[in-house]
Image: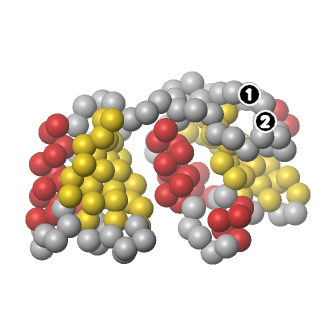
Amino acid sequence: MNNKTVILDVREEIRNGREPFSKIMGTVWKLRSDQSFLLIAPFEPVPLFAVLKKRGFAHESRQIGNGDWEVLFTRNGKSLGKTENLPQAQGSRENTPVKEVQFIYVDARGLEPPQPMIKILEALSDLSEDTEIRAHTDRRPMHLYTQLEARGFTSQSEEQSDGSFITHIRRN
């Protein structure tokens, strides 16, 4: 296995009724610039192609049996060539270690809208290249996403066990 390929197998999550989008995006965010990403899923994740294309990834996909798919995402379309050259995922499922990211924690719980969004947007000025904001809110910050995108930031929200949300925010 190429040690520059991070593998994520989401078949079990999907079979158990869990949504793997946050896990997928979290893996993508942690990729080093020299790494590619191999996703294994029980179907071809066509909607994901457009999402990752916006972040500079091209994809190559192939069906591997039992209806399962392997999709290799590479940065800037650096293709491996034919899809037969995709790394085989039959071996280890361990992810390649990735660089630890520093973060700024913003606790916006208990605030009435639009105060959580204002507090989070104010924290953007302190965000350096290798830092992310982890914003904790009572609700999914739906109105925040367009504000972040317009300012050149990407975001990913994860629902917590208590129903609150942690949103990871980074510069594009």
With 122 as the anchor, is 138 left or right in this view? right
Question: Which element type, helix, strand or loop, lies under badge 1?
Answer: loop
Residue at the front extreme?
162
The amino acid type found where label 1 is placed reads Asn
Residue 27, x across and y down, in percent: 54, 45
Residue 2, x across and y down, in percent: 74, 28
Q: Residue at x 42, y 62 (%)?
A: 158
Q: Residue at x 87, y 63 (%)?
A: 66
The residue at which mark 2 appears reads as: 87
Place residue 90 in its image quadrant: top right
How many residues crowd around disc 1 within 10 Å: few (fewer than 14), some, or many (20 or more)? Answer: few
> Considering depth in this image, is 11 or 160 the residue closer to the camera?
160
- Mark 2 vs 1: CB contact within 8 A: yes
With 48 as the anchor, is 67 left or right in this view? right
Residue 22, x across and y down, in percent: 49, 58
> Which dot marks residue 163?
none
Q: Residue at x 33, y 70 (%)?
A: 164
Place residue 87 in its image quadrant: top right
Which image quarter holds the N terminus?
top right
Residue at the right extreme?
65
Place residue 107 in its image quadrant: bottom left
The residue at which mark 1 appears reads as: 2
Above-or-below relation of 61 to 67: above
Q: Is residue 142 visible?
A: no
The amino acid type found where label 2 is placed reads Pro
